[in-house]
Image: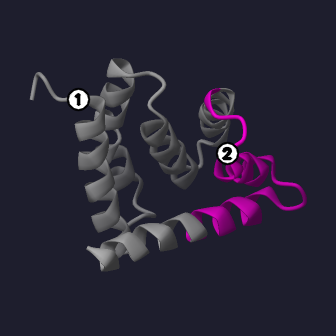
Amino acid sequence: MENTTATELYAQVYRQWQEVVELGLHESEDIVNGIMPPLARALSLEPDYLPALDLLSDLLMELGAYEEAVELVERMLVLCPDDPGYRGKLDALAGEGNRRRSIRAYLHQKRQQVLSRVVAR
């Protein structure tokens, strides 16, 4: 495990997240917090690894850590300024109108994408 790459760590966490979403356990703070450490390790290995930044920002949003998520999304947009998905995430976090509703709708959409990948495997 010592030579694990950022990509491998991300893939491990993404599989765990798929399982969490599939089981409907995404609202459990303990579970979400429990799968985050490998993402932090992935980012320590490769700080600009966009998939890990994206997933970590989603998990932070699930936990209600919106300001931390905003920091990650702003970093993602510096790295990839034309990505409409990252822009949409920042818009949800900015919450024009009802921030909580925007974030919940965004997260619901992202969980649906995760579920569609579970079905596809």
Residue 78, horizontal then vertical, whole percent: 68, 27
Counting from the top left corner in percent of width and height, residue 2 is at: 11, 22
Q: Which percent across, then down, holds residue 22? A: 34, 74
Quarter of image, res 67: top right
Q: Is residue 16 visible?
A: yes
Q: Quadrant of the C terminus?
A: bottom left
Residue at the spot of label 1 = 5
Q: Quadrant of the N terminus?
A: top left
Q: Which residue is mark 2?
A: 83
Dot 1: what SS?
loop
* Residue 90 is covered by the magenta coloring: yes
Disc 2 residue type (three-letter): Asp
Q: Is 55 situated above or below 101?
A: above
* Residue displayed at 32% across by 20% down: 45
* Direction bottom: furthest residue: 119
- Scheme by which the image is coloured: one colour
Rendered residue at 67%/45% (across/down): 83
Helix, strand or loop for disc 2: loop
Q: Earlier in the sequence, mark 1 or mark 2?
A: 1
Out of 25 and 85, give the one closest to the viewer.
Answer: 85
